[in-house]
Image: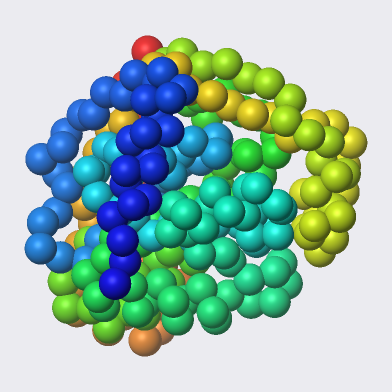
Amino acid sequence: MFSYSPLLISQSFLAATGTRLFLHHQDRIPEASAVLVVSNHRSFMDAPVLMASVGQPIRFACHHYMSQVPILREFVKRLGCFPLDEPGQGQQRFFNQATQLLQAQQMVGVFPEGGKPMVKLTQADQMQKFHKGFAHLALRSPVKELAILPVAIASVEETVNSAFPLKLLSLFDPAEPLFDQPGWHPLVIYRRVNVLIGRPCWITQQEREKYHGKQAKAVVAQITQHCQTEIGQLLDRGCY
């Protein structure tokens, strides 16, 4: 059974860093249903911030390289994260594991921007285009009541340092093209951060029927765009 220790680790970590967290629209968090959390992603602190915000463990899909780098590997493991497959290998293992967790009524977390905003610093109110994998996951999962919960992490005050050269990470994950460039991996530490819960997107039987028909691409694109738009609007309000 999944331990609650990741939540305690997250709360203790934020206390140790002195991060001040402000939660908005908590009443939008679904109860007694499977939940797929999607959020913007700029910092290694995002998973602990989201867990501390919703008050329960979230099983996050993390970038493959995080399961390869010593120390970082142990940290994400203790948080209950599970790694994506290597770039170019498909994501069948991710889909299988995430589906099993959702069927067990555990919260699953996905960062649809991928790893790019983690290695190339962006402004707090900016996002990369969302990948569509989370929408495919939601539509494929045989879970009767499933909500996609968009959440915005809006940094109000932060410090940014240089962690380590990107080229160094190629030693642990040579298949990742993001590391084949000069520069340093940024380390974003939140000092004050707003966490804004968006309106849940419930996956209906009608949408699943469309997914297995001619409208499959359209329904995937619609769900993806809804979540990105919702998070973008929340960021606009939360970063100021």
Residue at screen point 84% across, 60% down:
174
Q: Is residue 232 above or below residue 93?
A: above
Q: Residue at x 37, y 34 (%)?
A: 12
Left or right, 34 with respect to 175, comes to left
- Residue drawn at x 37%, y 50% as measured from the top left: 6
Determine whether 192 is above or below 184 in the image.
above
Quadrant of the image occupied by residue 235: top left
Rendered image quadrant of residue 50: top left
Q: Is the image coloured rainbow, by chain, by secondary structure, or in one colour? A: rainbow
Please determine whether, in this image, residue 50 is positioned above or below residue 125: below
Q: Which x, y percent locates residue 113?
A: 55, 48
Residue found at x 58% / y 75%: 91
Q: Quadrant of the N terminus?
A: bottom left
Given residues 218 and 120, the one toward you in this image is 120
Q: Where residue 101 sits in the image (x, y, percent)?
A: 33, 73
Is residue 232 visible from the viewing direction of this image? no
Q: Which quarter shows the C terminus?
A: top left
- Residue 185 visible to the viewer: yes
How many numbered marks, from 0 up? 0
Q: Is residue 159 left or right of residue 192?
A: right
Q: Is residue 50 left or right of residue 94?
A: left
Which x, y percent locates residue 212? Answer: 36, 86
In the picture provided, is 237 more to the left or to the right than 90? Answer: left
Q: Tell me where residue 93 appears, x and y as whole percent.
A: 54, 79
